[in-house]
Amino acid sequence: MPDIQDGHAQAGESSWPFDTGKGTAVHQDGWQDMTARMAPSAVSGYLGDAALNVKVSSIVVPGVDIAAGEAMVRGFCYKTTGVTVKLEDNTPSPDPRMDTIVLRLDMANNEIYAAALKGQPAASPKPRQLTQQQGGIWEFPLAYALIKKASNEIDTVTDCRMFSDGGKLPQAADPSKADPIPSPGDSFYMRDTNGIESLSSFSNRGGWAINEDIGKYRSYTPHLNYASQDSPKPQLKGHWKWISQNTVYFVANIINNDNKREIHAGGQQVYMNVDLPVKSRGGVFQVVNSVLFNNSDSAESEDNYWIGNAYISGGSTVQPVFQNTTDLKATGDWLTRIPHNASVWISGVYEADVFNEGNG
């Protein structure tokens, strides 16, 4: 039978911390239950800070040096003025391995310390799964160290720190590496090595994905495929953005700056297409806009302005199709030639294949 409420805490109810009464004794499990919900496990600071940065050690081989810094690990504080960690096993293996540098919270011994988790040697090594047990061992990753095959030397160190400060949105170079056990709705700010900024979230239906790019567009080169080898080389301009999860807006310009020669397909029954910035989802056809603008001073068989569409049928290319504006009853025309001083413009929104939904 459940306790009957009489205006005071019953046997099955608890609350803390208080100055007086039942909630004055706060044990560490209760402290973890409270603080882990208020602050994520993260390095204190901002993306790009040197706090707890990991690099190859000049003191211990194989080993890593961890810079001074602070962190929260599952509700508990950690601080160091700098520490060196020796990797667990320096016996060379015929295959490389991936070790993980972590902060380990040990509730049984009331401490947090830096440690290295030895990975399994393999042709394509992967990090070892972390231990994350509420009330027990909780490991928070700082970096991955790739050990060379047939050697005990560290080849590369990959940063996987997640940052948080003052309740602001957590920041990470790659959230999928920073938090191996995320919860639905977890969100992060990211900035990649090219300075591109974005917001990402985690969902049970798909995992990590970018919500949207913020700031400047991403540039890309929209290669023109299946043009003949003797055609002039076009000027290629393109940019794109994630505008929603798994959804891309892009612009591609293919410009023939040659004053005399056209760009034409490399054979009969061959049609030119253009690269997309990221792979599209298969199993469905998608349509974006395309235009051929003929800016030639001399007469050409084409009109000066051809309107059209471009279809995407999965994969990494888009296929322009133009309407014959002089004969609206005629069929559409594939992209087989771009007159001299003419341009092809393609832009639109399409569904990408981030979640590997394939042909579904």
Image (spheres, helix red, strand yellow):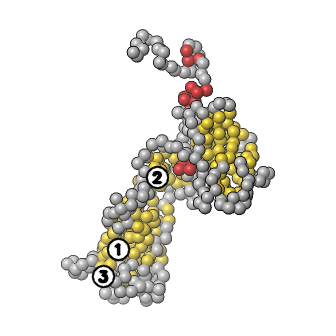
**Can the viewer see residue 162 in this picture?**
no
Q: Secondary structure at mark 1?
A: strand
Closer to us: 55 or 328: 55
Q: Position of residue 296 (x, y in %)?
A: 38, 84
- Tell me which label, 2 or 3, sits earlier in the chain: 2
Q: Secondary structure at mark 3?
A: loop
Residue at left offset 53%, top offset 50%:
176
Please say if 116 is above or below 223.
Answer: above
Disc 3: CA contacts within 10 A as few (<14), some (14-19) or many (>=20): some
Residue type of the residue flagged with mark 2: Ala
| Total count of labels | 3
Residue 27 located left or right of residue 241 = right
CA distance separating discs 2 and 3 = 43 Å
Q: What residue is shown with label 2?
A: 209
- Tell me which label, 3 or 1, sits earlier in the chain: 3
Residue type of the residue flagged with mark 3: Asp
Q: Position of residue 6 (x, y in %)?
A: 42, 10
Q: What residue is shown with label 3?
A: 303
Q: Position of residue 270 (x, y in %)?
A: 37, 82
CA distance separating discs 2 and 1 = 29 Å
Residue at left offset 54%, top offset 46%:
180
- Tell me which label, 2 or 1, sits earlier in the chain: 2
Disc 2 versus disc 1: nearer the observer: 2
Residue at left offset 69%, top offset 42%:
114
Residue that lies at the very extreme toward the left in this rendered image: 329
Please say if 271 is above or below 277.
Answer: below
Closer to us: 286 or 2: 2
Q: What residue is shown with label 1?
A: 320
Please say if 159 is above or below 339.
Answer: above
Residue type of the residue flagged with mark 1: Pro
User: Which of the numbered marks, if any, corresponds to residue 342?
Assistant: none
